[in-house]
Amino acid sequence: MRFTTLVAVLALALPTAILADDDNAPSFGAAGLLSGSNKEDLPPIILSAGVPIASEGAWELRSGTYYEFEIQGDGSQELALVGPEFFRAIWIDEIVVEGLEIRPLGLDSIEFDEAGEMEIGFIAIKPGRYYIKIPGTTGETQRLDITIK
């Protein structure tokens, strides 16, 4: 048997043998963000012509906490949300649209051309004051203020 083949066989077999042999090995369960105790659901954002986007007011988030929220578009008009500063202050885990999971490296804006729903899961990272809003609007009802502490 060649030396490199022997090393490869041992590299594959040794960890399995060690783990299978030790009933007293410590069990490392999910911790931190993976434990589920550090996750919060946020109120949905509704995109509809003439309807305020944040029905429950501003968001106050904690850095290091995992959040999920839904964006619901009713199709009454093409509507978008922009918030590049906010999207750069978070780490986006996934965006789910009709059961399809998208794992982007970043985000600048989203747009609904027709009725639909998406869910965004993210970790708040950079403390500060941010917003997401419908582009081209100036009214407070078409803007969601967000603070990360």
Image (tube, rainbow, N blue to C red):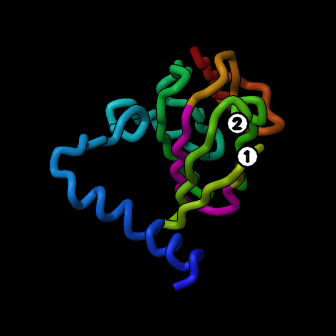
Q: Is residue 65 left or right of residue 86?
A: left
Q: Dominant secondary structure of the magenta stretch?
A: strand
Residue at horizontal 71 percent and vertical 53 percent from the top: 111
Q: Which quadrant holds residue 136?
A: top right
Q: Please determine whether, in this image, residue 61 is positioned above or below residue 70.
A: above
Residue at horizontal 47 percent and vertical 34 percent from the top: 66
- Give whichever of 22, 47 is nearer the camera: 22
> Residue 74 at x, y = what percent?
56, 54
Q: Is residue 7 left or right of residue 30?
A: right
Position of the C terminus, as image quadrant, is top right
Real-space Cα separation, disc 2 to disc 1, in angstroms: 6 Å
- Residues packed near mark 1 inside 10 Å, few (<14), some (14 to 19) or many (20 plus): some
- Mark 1: which amino acid? Leu
Q: Are marks 2 and 1 in contact (CB under 8 Å)?
A: yes
- Mark 2: which amino acid? Phe
Helix, strand or loop status at disc 1: loop
Magenta highlight range: 112-123
> Residue 86 at x, y = what percent?
70, 30
- Residue most toward the bottom? 1
Residue at horizontal 59 percent and vertical 35 percent from the top: 53
Number of numbered discs: 2
Tell me the number on the disc at residue 87.
Answer: 2
> Residue 8 at x, y = what percent?
52, 73
Q: Please determine whether, in this image, residue 75 is positioned above or below residue 56.
A: below
Q: Is residue 53 left or right of residue 15?
A: right
Q: Is residue 80 left or right of residue 114?
A: right
According to the picture, the residue beneath numbered tag 1 turns out to be 107
> Residue 132 at x, y = what percent?
69, 32
Helix, strand or loop status at disc 2: helix
Closer to the chain start, of discs 2 and 1, is 2
- Residues packed near mark 2 inside 10 Å, few (<14), some (14 to 19) or many (20 plus): some
Residue at horizontal 51 percent and vertical 85 percent from the top: 1
